[in-house]
Image (cartoon, rainbow, N blue to C red):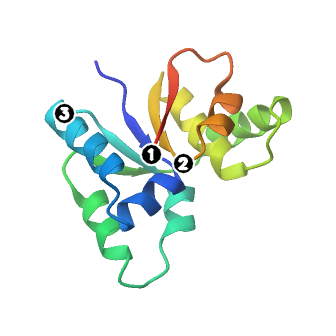
Amino acid sequence: MTPPLILDTGALIAVIRRSRAVWVLLDEAQRSEREVLVPAATLAESVRGGPGDAMINRLVQRPGSQVTVHDERRARSAGHLLARASTADVVDALVVAEAIHQGGATIATSDPDDIADLASGNRNVTAVRI
């Protein structure tokens, strides 16, 4: 089973800006029937009720895409990740916690260094710069 593609806030902003890099990843995900996950916190950081939301709305409504929820288990995992990382970005930690919860994932991000720091020790979690 192919691990999911998770989009962080930077990736969702790239969707709005129609970045070729993120659309290539999304096209590859669709062709390989790879699930695309949008953690709820990244959605909250990205949507503003304006015209740019249309691209994100289309993305989350595509077959194979879903918005994931941050339950207690993921929240506690994110807190533990933050405790040992050199970053304090809660949303990034929730994105990595989702990847760990999934048993591994590729995270599309504009900040792969922070994601890699948070995912340190989790070989099944990789970051791809968009």
Foreground residue among 99 and 69: 99
Query: Which three-letter amino acid code belongs to the residue tagged 3?
Result: Glu
Foreground residue among 32 and 70: 32
State left or right for residue 33 relative to residue 70.
Answer: left
Query: Which three-letter amino acid code belongs to the residue tagged 1?
Result: Ile
Callout 2–callout 3 Cβ contact below 8 Å: no
Q: Earlier in the sequence, mark 2 or mark 3?
A: 3
- Mark 2 surroundings within 10 Å by alpha-carbon count, few (fewer than 14), some (14 through 19), many (20 or more): many
Circle 1: element type: loop
Q: Position of residue 119 (x, y in %)?
A: 64, 27
Callout 2–callout 1 Cβ contact below 8 Å: yes
Which quadrant does the N terminus fall into? top left
Q: Which residue is drawn at 36% across and 60% down?
A: 15
Q: Position of residue 67 (x, y in %)?
A: 40, 53
Task: Return the mark for residue 130.
Answer: 1
Number of numbered discs present? 3
Q: Where is residue 65 in the image (x, y as percent from the top left)?
A: 29, 48
Specify the quadrant of the image occupied by residue 81: top right
Which of the two discs, 1 and 3, sits closer to the camera? 1
Query: Which three-letter amino acid code belongs to the residue tagged 2?
Result: Ser
Which quadrant does the C terminus fall into? top left
For label 3, the residue is 33
